[in-house]
Amino acid sequence: MNASNASGSEKLQPPVGIDLGTTLSAVAYIDASGRPTTIPNRSGDLLTPSAVAFEEGVVVVGKEAIKGSVLTPGSFAECFKRDMGRGKFHRPISGEDVPPEVCSAFLLARLKEDAEHRIGPIRQVVITVPAFFDEGRRKATQDAGRLAGLEVLDIINEPTAAAVSYGYHRTVLGDVPNGNPYPKERLLVYDLGGGTFDVTILDIDGGTFRTVATDGDVQLGGKDFDERLIDYLAENFKAEHGLDPRSDPEDSAQLWIDAQEAKHALSERQKTTVVCYHAGIRMRQEITRAKFEELTQDLLGRTESTMSLVVKEAGLNWTNIDRILLIGGSTRMPAVEAMIRRVTNKEPDRSQSPDEAVAHGAALYARMLMGRQAAAGQSEIELVNVNSHSLGVVGINPKTGERVNAIVIPKNTPLPCCKVKKFQTAQANQPDVMVSVVEGESRRPEHCIALGECVIRDLPPGLPQGARIEVEYQYAANGRLSVSARVPSTRQSAHVTIERKRKATVESLDAWRNRLCGISISGGIPGGSSGEQSAAGDKELGFAEPEDRAGLRKRLDEFYTRLGELAVTGVEVPDALEASLRSARDAVERMKRIEAARKKALQAQESAMGATEASRAASDAAAAGEAFEHAKKRARFACLVLGRECIDVGVTAGEFEKFMPEIVRLRHRLGD
């Protein structure tokens, strides 16, 4: 979009780029002198943790959300970038199934708000994505921007953005001091972030950035290295004390935080210490850099294999690569640099900030899209991308009769491009021809992503089997795909522009904020059986009539929890709810076991003899009491989820039927 088409207020907005990372995000803009500059958030930090938490009436974003995760892990979400393109985040948040783009939108809204405090109103932005993101994930990222009140000018691949930043800072976009153009350069960008990994080879010639090849893994990043360390520490604790700190959501959340800090420390020193806490027990463990590298060597090996494969698929060898640029916070691990030296016999380039380069490149690209002139002595930017996934059509193998994916545009084809492939009708007198378009490398269509269909209808009778069909793909530089199919013998054709199939997120951020921040799952399991509840039992459960939305949600959750308890005690539920029923039963049984242990600890405290024994018994009783409170919260939440699912599928208990009219009324008022 050109700035001349924008409103007057948008003309004044500087170009802005957002690096929407898995674990950390950054915002940059082009300042008055034409330089890309990172914008600090409201806390003064250049990076904002990509995490959100939902408390009573407020959405918490960033560092404070991570701190709160230790106390309320069920209302906390991070690494939602890995789930982009899917229908929901991989686990419920505050008891709700939340689309990952909603979490990203809350993060983007906060980034937007913080940046506006520094540079004024923002609307038009460029957002970055991993190069290996498919189009479904890219569309979800754009949806997140829209939900956050942003106009997403374009999506740019993170390695490409880093290369643009490198080009700017190395004067590739201008002239070297002696007046000669900067020589052409072939760059390999190794981008290992918090949750994704990309390798991209680019040719840089002045202001032109031409992608040669790309590959990656959207499920590999620093978080996976953290998890290896967490498992090691937890298994040591379990071997020593017979308890697993990962079984407690709050202790597990604290262990994640401590493991991340230990990983960062091991990038600076040879060893560090982690204190693991669970069930009132503190265990100090020492971890060395050598041990950490041993635990994660296969993860690093995956990045090595991907890097070598990209070079091979591009028809190159390491002598053809001029520079290896390290991007992403996880490249600070010493093992990464050592591996690259060993494999390539080259010294990695650390000239760019691994945390800021991507946002800087996105801001430079935004400047181009907004029609702003480059500063004196700088060339304009031109990007030439490749497709990261192959595109094909579903055909029939004439020998086996099986459906196959016939690839028309292989991965790493320069864009824009146009390709034509010939097929044949499967049978005589075929009335229609349907071309199913898929994305993926597998020959089996069911293992690929279905993108859309192009249909030629009303073919004339008498068309023989094997009549020629020509399918033409037109893949634009912005990723828009058009497909044409024609039957030359009848001069009939059809054309379709593929719109990625995706379920729309209809609710606004305000609606999601009300849903997620109004849920309260604190407190214990209500006492007494439901059969003992009378009409007056409504008040005994604390079901006073609230008027605010949060109160209505809390009231409805009390009903859900009670119904879940009934299901646990014997109400029949469909097989589809078996997993939720088992989870609730396990949580309730665990709570009962911990409650028995607490009573035993209290009895031991009462009968303790001597100051030393009394002190130890008091400590044990306090730890047992804390463990019981945690178990009670988990049991209540599991019953809440089960009860809500029972209502969703129409299951009710006889003694609970008197509450059904109220449940229906509350669900209607809340829009459930």
Image: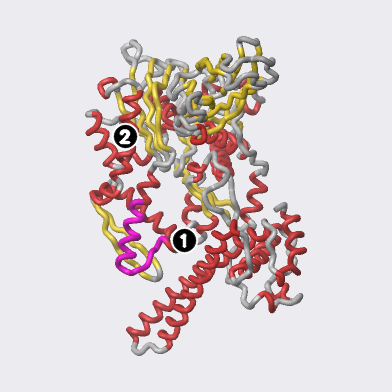
Asked if residue 121 shows in the view, the reply is no
Amino acid type indicated by mark 1 = Pro
Numbered range of the magenta stretch: 228-246
Amino acid type indicated by mark 2 = Ser
Residue 249 image label: 1
Q: Nearer the viewer, residue 221 or 609?
A: 221
Q: Position of residue 201 (x, y in %)?
A: 37, 24
Q: Position of residue 668 (x, y in %)?
A: 75, 55
Q: Is residue 278 magenta?
A: no
Left or right: 457 with respect to 287? Answer: right
Q: What's the distance in space between the residues labelled 1 and 2, CA to CA?
A: 35 Å
Mark 2 highlights which residue? 305
**Residue shown at 46% from the left, 28% from the top:** 389
Helix, strand or loop: magenta stretch: helix
**Dividing the image into 4 quarters, which one contains the N terminus?**
top right
Left or right: 418 with respect to 343? Answer: right
Q: Nearer the viewer, residue 102 or 494?
A: 494
Q: Nearer the viewer, mark 1 or mark 2?
A: 2
- Against 107, residue 551 (above or below) is below
**Residue shown at 62% from the left, 19% from the top:** 428
Number of residues whose C-alpha sits closer than 10 Å to that of mark 2, classed few (under 14), some (14–19) or many (20 or more): few
Q: Is residue 241 magenta?
A: yes
Disc 2 on helix, strand or loop?
A: helix
Left or right: 345 with respect to 304? Answer: left
**Residue shown at 40% from the left, 80% from the top:** 618
Asked if residue 425 shows in the view, the reply is yes
Disc 1 on helix, strand or loop?
A: helix
Q: Nearer the viewer, residue 420 or 587?
A: 420
